[in-house]
Structure formats: C-alpha cells, structure tokens
Image (cartoon, rainbow, N blue to C red):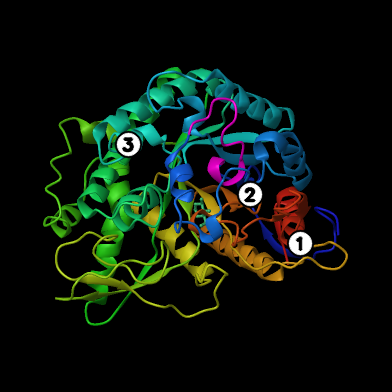
Amino acid sequence: MRAGSDDYRDSGLVFPEGFTFGSATASYQVEGAAQEDGRLPSIWDTFSMTPGRVWNGDTGDVACDHYHRWESDLDLMKDLGLDAYRFSIAWPRIVPAGTGAVNQAGIDFYSRLVDGLLERGIRPVATLYHWDLPQPLEDAGGWPVRATADAFERYAEIMGAALGDRIHTWTTLNEPWCSAYLGYGQGGHAPGRAEPAAALAAVHHLNLAHGRAVQALRATSTGDPEYSVTLNFHVARGRGPQAAEAVRRVEALANRAFTGPMLRGEYPADLLEDTASVTDWSFVQDGDLEAIHQPIDVLGVNYYSTVTAQLWDGVSPRQMNDGHKAVAGGTAWPGSDGVLEFLEQPGPYTAMGWNIAPEGLEELLLSLREQFPDQALMVTENGAAFDDEVADDGSVPDPERLDYLRRHFTAAHRAMQQGVDLRGYFVWSLLDNFEWGYGYAKRFGIVRVDFDTLERTVKQSGEWYARLAKTGTIPE
Ligand code: IFM
C-alpha cells in the first residue's frame, strides 16, 4: 500500500477545512550528530552516558541521523501530506555553553530546515526547549536556579531574530512537568536529581522562562508567528476513600502549577498549601507572575493515557518508578500530608504499559474548554509505542498503533463537535527514535527506523495517517 492510498473506507468523520495535520519529533531524540558543528553536551548527553541511566546504554549520539538526513525526511513528510512539522531546536547547538558565544553553524542548520519545510509547503512549528539543557547551565544549578530562565530568554531572543521571519508557530517549552518533576523530583530523567524543593523551584523557573521567552520572541520575530506552550496534562481518576482529594492534588501539581501562572497569572492557592512543607515559594519574585502571564495563540496539549491515583495518609513516601504511570511518591509529587500512589489501570496497554483511553482525550479537551473558554487548542503529541515487526515483504503492519490513532482522532473529533476550538493534531512521532530512559527499545514512529542501517519505512499507520492528512476525513 502506498502512502495515502485509496484502500480505506471513509468513516464520514470530517475535520474542518484548515485543520492542521502534523507530526512531531524532538532534537535529542532524532538528530544525532551530537558532537558536530559546535554542539556541546546537554544534560541528556551526560545522563545517557552515565551507566545504568538509559536502557542498554543507548545514547542520542546517532539517533535517526536526522541532522544529516533532514532533506529526505522532509520529502517523506511531503509524501505523507503533512501540513506542519513540529520539531525542537537544540539549545546546545545555538548557545553551546548555555551563556556566552552563539554558534552560527547551529542557527544555519535550523534555518536550512525551516527553508526546506517552506519549500515543500509544510509549516514549521518550532519548540525552543524539549529537555536538552546545555550541561554548563546544569553545572551552575539548572532549572532550580533563576539564572537558567535568564539564559533561556537570551536564547529565545537569538532564535526569534534568526527564524522569526519564517516560523509559523513558536512553542516555548515541551512538557515542563517532565523537566521539573522527572528531572529534579524523581530523577528518572536528566539531570537525575531527586530533590523535592528543587523540583518546585524548577517549576517556577520554567514558567518564568516561558513568559520571558514569549516576550523575547514577540520582540524579535519579524514575521507573524503564533505563540504557544505545550503541556502534558494529567487526566486523573481517583480511588479509595479520598478519591476526589487525590484527583485535586494531581491536577494541582501536574496541570494547574503551569496553567495557573501561564493562563491566569497566579499560582493556585491549593498548590501552595499542598507543598508548604517542602517550600515557601520564596523564589517567586515581584513581577514574575506578570512576566509569566503572556497571551498565547494556541495551547499545546500532549495526551497519551490517563492516571489513577490514591491518597494514603501517614505512610512514608515511595519513589515514583515511571514517569507516566505506576507508583509516585513524595519526591516526584512533592506534597505535605500523605502520599499519592499511582495505581495500575485497566488495559489494554501500549508497549509503554500505558493504558489506552481515548475518552480521556475527549474529556481533557472539554475540560480545557471549560477552564479556558477563549483559548484555542492544538494536540501537539499523541501516539503509541508498540513492538512492531517487519513482514517478509519489508512492510510494517502496525494495526494496534493505527487503531490507537483512529480512536484518538475520533475522540478529538467528538470534542470538536461539542464546541472545542481544536486547530490541529500532531502525531508522536514521525520516526521511531530515542525514547529517553527506554533508549531505542520503544518505537513510537509512524515511520520505522532500522537503527542498524537508518533506513526509513512508512508503517501501515503512516499510510493511514497520510490518507487522513490528505482527505481530512478519518479513514476506517
Ligand atoms: O517521546 C516523548 C516525548 O519526547 C515527550 N512526550 C512523550 C513522548 C513519549 O514518551
């Protein structure tokens, strides 16, 4: 079957004209060329080279070699009929030491990439930070210190001036929840620190970095880009006698810790109360909330599965053992009384062990519309890892991923029928890639990458998605 072939029946579910169909990647996960053209190490280079941190000792040194193969990757996106490509810029290619000298070779790479997208009629959606903090900034304290937000503002200014004439959508941060809580609270992500107070300071400095970056990008971009941020919202269900309280706590720490300051200009009072024994939030300085509270054109929503939490009183914190599911405790979820335990959920599951719950996406989009009625939304990530097998004829049938995507697009469509202003949808991911702590063991791509030869093969789900992108109608 060819990309976008006619071998599907239409469901009759049509997205409106102008709806954006895209796919997403991130710099450290796909680029490779980690030591080339002036790039210096990020926290993920350091982390992945630390024995025991990443499955199989995998690193992003080569990844998908997108840094060298970007032109043929863009051709592939064009064949798939994508309207937009969501990529991230590696800060350590642009300001390799985090502060100080700017590396023109890094800027040139992204400039060529953006021109290549525009030549092919694909809109560039650029994220400034998808977790690859320059290592020297971590050595100076990382996101728990304010100077990191200062350095990010300067990096945003540089990128606005360099690409702000051509970028369609600027996204400041990808999933600051992961950066703060997994990087500094639980330690399963780089830089691997487990310090609850530092995690909350990181939350604030990431928020500050977002607001300052929106202002810097606006001041320097000469085109007419849109501005956004991408959050990985937790859709929580509660269990046990304190079910509602468990949900409230999860939502405060995971969702409202970001939407509060970014979209309302304040930290929620219950979040400050929940975390009072961990920090007094004195790192929030006068003027910070005004700086963070910037109008954005579109709110990026990443959704994969739901979480189920139970609150236990009077037990000692247990360590969280997985970023998106399983057991979470005091370090990843800094709070005062009691411990949040994340429970096994009913299946079916993806290869990540995440439960498949398309209704959670519909619920999330409806809830965001209720909370922020005037805010346009964009699904900036949704997709699934499965253990794909290559068939004898070289094709990659991946019916489970196809089904996952079909059901989630259908859920998003249902939300739109109920009035949600959803502007587009980016499938995670274009390519199989470096899945952080799981290395190359988990494949999310709609395009298979053979990590020995780096050859790309469009999977069955990719062909299905091409059909959707080209017709605007969900294929059966
Ligand atoms: O691969 C990640 C991506 O970098 C951020 N969002 C979740 C994806 C799947 O784990």
- Image quadrant containing the C terminus: bottom right
Is 459 situated above or below 102? below
| Residue underneath mark 1 | 460
Mark 1 closeness class: few <14, some 14–19, many ≥20 residues within 10 Å: many
| Residue underneath mark 3 | 139
* Side of 364 where 107 appears, left or right: right
Q: What is the CA distance from the residue labelled 2 to the residue labelled 3?
A: 48 Å
Q: How many marks?
A: 3
* Side of 44 where 15 appears, left or right: right
Q: Quadrant of residue 219?
A: top left
Q: Circle 3 sits in a helix, a strand or a loop, which is it?
A: helix
Residue closest to the eye, 305 or 378: 305
Query: Is residue 432 shown to the viewer in this render?
Result: yes
Mark 2 closeness class: few <14, some 14–19, many ≥20 residues within 10 Å: some
The residue type indicated by label 2 comes to Pro
The tag earlier along the polypeptide, 1 or 2, is 2
Numbered tag placed on residue 16 in the rendering: 2
Q: Circle 2 sits in a helix, a strand or a loop, which is it?
A: loop
Location of residue 94 in the rendering, given as x and y in whole percent from the top left corner: 49, 26
What is the magenta range? 27-40
Query: Residue 28 lies in magenta, yes or no?
Result: yes
